[in-house]
Image: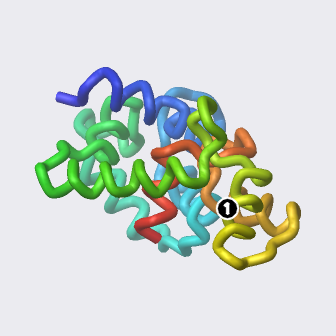
Amino acid sequence: MVHAATAERFSSVFSSFDRDADGRISAAELQLCMKAALGEDVSAEDAEALVASADADGDRRLNEEEFLRLVARPETEAEEERCRGLREAFAMYEVRGEGCITPASLMRMLARLGSEQGIEECRAMIRRFDLNGDGVVCFDEFKVMMDA
């Protein structure tokens, strides 16, 4: 069973992967989104296998519940500890109270770390991991980025 808070967090990710807005993610949609969001080239066969691994109703597409079961694994104690560390790192970059990393907040933090990047470079970095296309990186997208 997926927790309600987890389901809510991944709902926007599901919507961004569901390119044709039919309420289901096909292997082709999954393949395209993984390329756009993560820069990962996933073969058609691998995308089909991933969909098949979570496709409970056998329609060869993922509804939101199936997608959530695929991406929202239960957190173990080790994963919980890792998330705490990631939340601390995320907090260094995020806009206080907004819960997201913006190009400007990324640029400020990188400057503090001695890496001078322009706003356009920071926008490009954020676009690479902005799964829902809102122009910022939320914590779930940050976790994906850190795993890349």
| Residue 127 position (above or below residue 135) | below
Residue name at image x 51 percent, y 54 percent: 142
x then y, percent, for residue 105 = 72, 51
| Residue 85 position (above or below residue 2) | below
Residue name at image x 37 percent, y 40 percent: 67
x then y, percent, for residue 136 = 69, 45
Residue name at image x 72 percent, y 57 percent: 127
x then y, percent, for residue 83 = 31, 51
Q: Is 74 situated left or right of 23 in this image?
A: left
In the image, what residue type sits under mark 1?
Met
x then y, percent, for residue 139 = 49, 45
Density class for disc 1 (Cα within 10 Å; few <14, some 14-19, many ≥20) is some
Instruction: From the viewer's side, name the closer residue of 33 and 133.
Output: 133
- Residue at image mark 1: 109
Q: Residue furthest top?
A: 4
Q: Is 123 situated left or right of 144 in this image?
A: right
